[in-house]
Amino acid sequence: MIKKPTMSDIAAACGVSQATVSLVLNNAPGTRISPATREAVLSAAARMGYRTQPRRIDRRPLIAMLINEVTSSPHVAGLIDGAGEAANELGYLLSVMPTDADEEAEQAALSHLATLPASGVIYARLITQQVTLAPQLAEWPTVLLNCYAVDKPLPSVVPGDLSAVMKATLSLIDAGHTRIAYIGGEDAIEASRERIKGYRRALTMRDIPVDNHLIIKGRWTIQGGYAAFKRLQALDDRPTAICCFCDRIAMGVYEAAKEAGLSIPRDLSVIGFDNESYSGDMLPPLTTMQLPHADMARYAVEKLAEMIAAPRMRHDNHKVKLECEMIVRQSVAPIDAV
């Protein structure tokens, strides 16, 4: 039997160390080996018939995240970062596949996924909503992130929008406010419907009548908040506090209140929603609710890992709602200070 050449044989033939041979043959970066030595080692290896051993590649099991949007909102960073961190900790490789809310693009992504050794799918939406699932998803363990399906129940995780606005409204009531307005978004958005339910429920819990004049729905923009506050200011019995669907609406309220000569929180308490990057820099810094996007994504990956590890086990297909944290700043004051 012919003895296979080793790195030691090449080192002896070239008059260099085995370490030098290893660095050359493995093309190690950042090494100071002269071109002449490198050429001598490579020539000796070829002449002696040395074959490098293929490197062992760490092939992690793949999970894919299909998501409809990745550019229209900063909130997507929390979803992707949370999922990526959890996947890495659990020994998975995460592949994010944006579909741009296009059905054909989603079908193409699923067809491509079928050619890969994928272990499971995180099916995500940027805005909380009900979804209709493609039949191909039945091929993999699947968890729904920031969405849910009624026709094909699967494990899903969404934010607790209703309980979040309940918490915000109750905090205003605890500060002594009873004339609390709510400026909401469009009813087509599920989060808008859930949040206004939370507002109404909080008032009912404290035996405060719901005054529909204090509820204004419209655009969830700075301009929408500005216009809504102007309408509230036209009331005979004006609100002393406002709960806003989002921080952009709150920013519009701030601007309109300033024009009206009102000081926040001395004359008016305001709570936002979303904890946008600018909310802590508003004057005064805005008290707001934080969506748990990173925690939701981590839950989705951990649940998916359970399903992959035990495919024959019966898994709960419940819709889990994660609580939103209140970020307390300086935009709320007790009614005594108003």
Image (cartoon, rainbow, N blue to C red):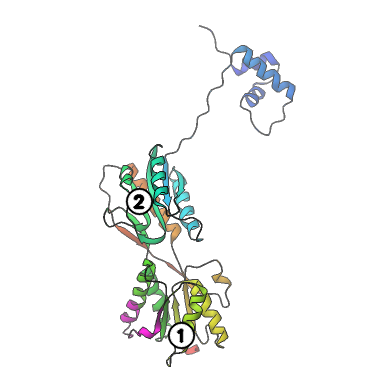
Image coordinates for residue 162, horizontal then vertical, percent: 36, 70
Q: Is residue 207 magenta?
A: yes
What mark, if any, has residue 143 been given in the picture? 2
Q: Nearer the viewer, mark 1 or mark 2?
A: 1
Q: Which residue occupies 61% across, 18% down?
A: 7
Image coordinates for residue 24, horizontal then vertical, percent: 65, 25
> Seen in the image, is 287 located left or right of residue 35?
left
Q: Is residue 274 magenta?
A: no
Residue labelled with disc 1: 231
Q: Amino acid at mark 1?
A: Arg
Residue 285 drawn above or below residue 156? below
Can residue 329 be seen in this snapshot? no
Q: Which residue occupies 40% across, 50% down?
A: 301
The crowding category of the residue bearing disc 2, from other C-alpha atoms within 10 Å (few below 14, some 14 to 19, many at least 20), is: many
Image coordinates for residue 249, horizontal then vertical, percent: 49, 75
Front residue (pair 147, 320): 147
Residue positioned most to the front: 104
Image coordinates for residue 268, horizontal then vertical, percent: 49, 85
Range covered by the magenta-colored residues: 200-216
Q: Which residue occupies 73% across, 24% down?
A: 35
Corner quadrant of residue 309: top left
